[in-house]
Image: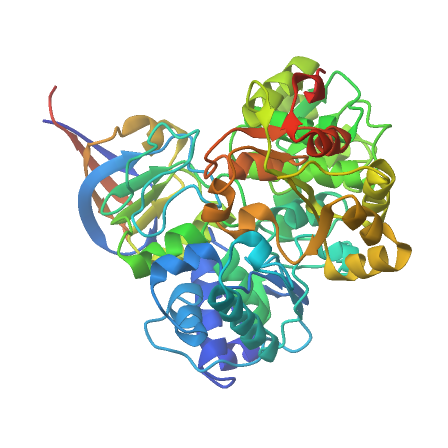
Amino acid sequence: MVKLTRDEQAMLEGAEGPLKRRALENVIKYAELVGAESLCPIRRATTFCGKHSYLNAAGDLNFREMFSRVQMGSDEILELAAIEPGCQTQSCVSPCETFEHQAFRQSKDLFAENQEYLKQSRAMGIVEVGTCSPYLNGWLPLPGEHFVTTESGMTILGNSLWGACCNSDGIEAAFWSSICGRTPLWGRHLPEGRRASIRVKIDFAPGEMLEWDLLGRAIGRKLPLHSQPVLSGDFSGADFNKLRQMLTALAVSSNCEICHIVGLTPEAPTLEAAFQGQDPAAYPEISLTRADLALAYQSVCDPGQGPVGLVSLGCPHYDIYQLQEVARLIKGRRVAPGVDLQVWTTLAIKGLADHNGFTETIEKAGGRLYSGSCPVTINSDYISGYSGILFDSLKQSGSARLYAAGPVYYGSTAACLEAAMAGEWKDDYRWKG
Amino acid sequence: MERLDIQGRGAIAGRVEGYALVCPESITGWGGIEPATGLIKDLESSNRGLSIAGKILVIPGSRGSNGWSCYYSITRVTGASPKGLLITRIDSSSAVAAVGLNIPTVVDFPAESDPCRLIQNGDYVIMDGAAGLVSISRAPK
């Protein structure tokens, strides 16, 4: 039985309207299912607001019908209402770029329908931001702060790097929590739910960004399900972007929600601290070598060489310095005919890129700087419309191969840009370890 | 006909029976299944090409993106929902999926009763989501 506060009991009895009642009912069911004894307030959420492609299977429903039936699990069509006051909520990526649809072979009607979904979400109090990387715009939980998010990378980053508290939950649950301002007090929201459960020894120092991305996948493939790893090794080459790349790759390759790193993350000043005083030797240990990186690379980069039609950079969405680097690498050069070179970031960072001249440099070279989405979020038809595609992100490469009609390649940012100029992926661009 | 009874924690009440679909490596999130049909698209799944629709779905937990539960919840609307869920160990994503599906669910089995190990595709399963009791019948080969 979940213990409710007086305010929660009143909300459950309908004092704040049917939408909040339904959202709270769902959160309570979720809490009962996991065995939580109470709920905890949240003040920060990201939600998946657009007309995403998976929703098409539900039929031709308007926003309110779709929201009620799919997100709230209600056969009754609910009156829409504002999200919980004080819960700072923003939208994650949508299936459409912020301004363009023709470049993505999307119809005007589809774009307009997505705009309507976003407009209705804004009317509920959700700020339209359209990014997987909310921290780039100042959406930053404090240590110990409870939050919900629809982005796997944000979940594991928030827990691991910032000591904030979040479970993976899901797209529906992020709406429930944003509306009623509560989530089950369970899992990563409790101190004991954050304890490491396995030791991971890394016997090499990861170097370039791609190796950190691969490391995340290599760990994820070796971890038993439900693991909470603590990593030991030489992480002196780490920076924020390398860590978010690695942690995002780890999250989508497993169901890991928190990853401690000895000497780097706040709950692991020592190996012992990550186990909260328990003997680390009592827990299992796995080791990774550079051979594991090679296996991870083979799993996300198809063999051989060949033409590429789409080269996409920026997953997670690039920060301003990554855009500066792309501009530096591409300046004065020209993308090959027939290649769509896309660079993805947030709308706010794009504004900075415009101001700093990076956008102009990228566009002069034949590339485009986009915001609000990414290729694998757009839809499966879009991905399958290319015969060869290339990413500098393991997450994109891993998801795109579910829909791709041709080879999916994966390389460093510099290798991707070289391939965009050449119009083809060559063996020379492949990561050699 | 061999028969085995195992006990987990009853999570969502209801008695249901049907043929099992066992995914010991779970199913990846964001695109791992087709919402309209329940077909498994996950390239790393041993059940790729089979459908979860109308089955007793047996999984160890979730795997992959936070966009995991939504692919199950929507099958409640499309009609491609499984009949029942057996989850070796509950986690946040699979719990949200179970709430969204609102079908009989049994979770948190003891290590010696792991349904992913004891049940095979095509076994006939009778499950009680309130009591947490699962009866498995296997036709002789």
Is B71 situated above or below A250? below
A302 or A423, nearer to the observer? A423
* Residue for point 43% across, 54% down: A54
Query: Which of the 4 image quarters holds residue A184?
Result: bottom right
Drawn side of residue A349 relative to residue A149, left or right: right
A427 or A95, nearer to the observer? A427
Quadrant where the image shows the C terminus of chain A: top right
Query: Which of the 4 image quarters holds residue A195?
Result: top right
Give residue B61's position: percent from left, percent from top.
44, 40
Is B3 situated above or below A427? below
- Residue lying furthest right: A356
Drawn side of residue A53 relative to residue A85, left or right: left
Give residue A62's position: percent from left, percent from top.
41, 74
Drawn side of residue A308 relative to residue B19, left or right: right
* Residue for point 41% across, 79% down: A78
A120 or A231, nearer to the observer? A120
Colour pattern: rainbow
* Residue for point 28% across, 56% down: B13
